[in-house]
Image (spheres, rainbow, N blue to C red):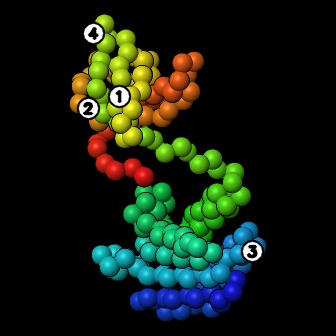
Amino acid sequence: MQVPIEIRFHQIEPSDSLEAEIRAHAERLDRLYGRLTACRVSIEPPPHQRQTGNLWNVHIELSVPGKTLVVTRDPHKAHLRHARPDLRKSIKEAFKSAERQLKDFKRVIRGDVKAHEAPFQGCIVRLDPGGEYGFLRTAAGGELYFSRTSVLDGFDALKVGDTVHYSSIDGDSGPVANKVWRGPAHHLD
């Protein structure tokens, strides 16, 4: 890491053994992704649970080039999963979650995760009276054919004027709207 790990204890006495444990977890993350630039860890009891002392908020921020990954351990979920949750379990679970986020980030950076084609937006302009196909107007003003089988949420529910989203493919006789579904009108770039 380019910046030393930052550990903050709020409303709890700092502990050398907890700090050592947190540093070990952070070093593991640094080995997992060598371009990790900073790691900030914050630990505090949740405001409404101070009297119990056994539910903890663990917040981790990991800085990587161009992005900040954030993990917040939800004490309520831990309460359901553990009969007697404690701070060390909370820290361990938060770092497991941080590790998963970091691995996911690495996959995106390497290109292992495919980018999905952005959907196009159009408007239904004609529907076949027999209910087998229709046409939609594209943002560019052209018309695209679509079949009953390409409509994801039911062809019979479509009406002329409905806003739809779609992907486009090349058919035998030109472009065809594929995977058509109704959706809210909004500007898609």
Kindly identify which residue carries mark 1.
136
Q: Amino acid at mark 3?
A: Gly
Q: Look at label 4 and name its amino acid.
A: Pro
In this view, the residue farthest toward the front is: 141
In this rendering, the label closer to the viewer, 2 or 1: 1
What residue did someone put label 2 on? 162
Relative to residue 44, is residue 146 depicted above or below? Answer: above
| Picture disc at residue 68 | none
Q: Which mark is residue 34?
A: 3
Work out whether mark 2 precedes mark 1 in sequence or the reverse, and give the earlier one.
1
Q: Secondary structure at mark 4?
A: loop
Q: Which of the two discs, 3 and 1, labels the residue nearer the N terminus?
A: 3
Quarter occupied by residue 40: bottom right
Q: Helix, strand or loop at disc 3? A: loop
User: Dot 3 surroundings within 10 Å: few (below 14), some, or many (20 or more)?
Assistant: few
Do tag 3 and tag 1 residues touch (Cβ < 8 Å)? Answer: no
**Mark 1 or 4, nearer chain start:** 4
Quadrant the N terminus occupies: bottom right
Could you tell me if residue 28 is visible in this image? no
Distance of label 3 from label 1 (alpha carbons)? 49 Å
Q: Are marks 2 and 4 in contact (CB under 8 Å)?
A: no
- Picture layout, residue 117 above or below residue 36: above
Between the residue at mark 1 and the residue at mark 4, the CA separation in whole angstroms equals: 15 Å
Mark 4 highlights which residue? 129
Corner quadrant of residue 94:
bottom right
Q: Is residue 88 left or right of residue 184?
A: right
